[in-house]
């Protein structure tokens, strides 16, 4: 996610939706399995369609439960989204809706992880997409399906 945010990479191929919460510009889902169709998720488009900011997406993910804290009891996706639209952030939601957070609901710590993740140093990454090299890597080294890889890489190269 960090590498796409800093424009070192075009997209992240993963099934973990936290990738867009961490700020990846583009996420590719379904590349590694023929059971699912390939999806290119554009984070800026998701935010625009939901009418929320990246910070609000982070709070939404935290409220629904993430790897870094417990979740708010009785809050599902629809209610969480409506509360974010109404109040803007977790602090205001807890205060205005008089919701008592569970003991392990460390939303401040979770938010800090999403906003400032620990990132390892990265060596030089080529600035241009080399479809042939990447295709070879995904197909030969990782054994991904050639037609799925080709389709996805062509989609990335064209837009």
Image (spheres, helix red, strand yellow):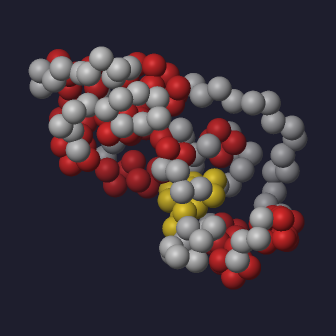
Q: Quadrant of residue 140?
A: bottom right
Compared across the picture, whether 121 is left or right of 79 comes to right
At x 50%, y 59%, the residue is: 41
The x and y percentages for residue 65 are 36, 37
Work out whether 117 lies above or below 16: above
Work out whether 76 lies above or below 109: below
The x and y percentages for residue 6 are 68, 39
At x 20%, y 26%, the residue is: 93
At x 54%, y 46%, the residue is: 19
Whether residue 88 can be seen here: no
Compared across the picture, whether 35 is left or right of 144 comes to left
The x and y percentages for residue 137 are 83, 64
Whether residue 84 can be seen here: yes
The x and y percentages for residue 138 are 77, 66
What quarter of the picture does the N terminus occupy? top right
Work out whether 1 lies above or below 56: below
100 and 98: which one is in front? 100
């Amino acid at each position: 996610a960090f590498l796409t945010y800093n424009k070192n990479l075009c997209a992240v191929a993963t099934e973990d939706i936290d990738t867009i919460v961490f700020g990846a510009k583009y996420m590719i889902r379904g590349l590694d399995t023929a059971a699912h169709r390939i999806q290119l998720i554009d984070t800026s488009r998701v935010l625009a369609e939901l009418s929320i900011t990246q910070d609000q997406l982070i709070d939404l993910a935290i409220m629904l439960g993430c790897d870094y804290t417990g979740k708010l009891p009785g809050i599902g996706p629809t209610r969480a989204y409506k509360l974010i639209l109404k109040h803007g952030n977790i602090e205001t939601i807890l205060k205005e809706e008089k919701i008592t957070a569970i003991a392990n609901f460390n939303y401040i710590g979770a938010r800090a992880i999403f906003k400032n993740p620990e990132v390892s140093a990265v060596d030089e990454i080529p600035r241009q997409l080399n479809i042939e090299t990447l295709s070879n890597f995904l197909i030969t080294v990782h054994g991904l399906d050639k037609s799925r890889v080709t389709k996805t890489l062509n989609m990335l190269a064209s837009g």
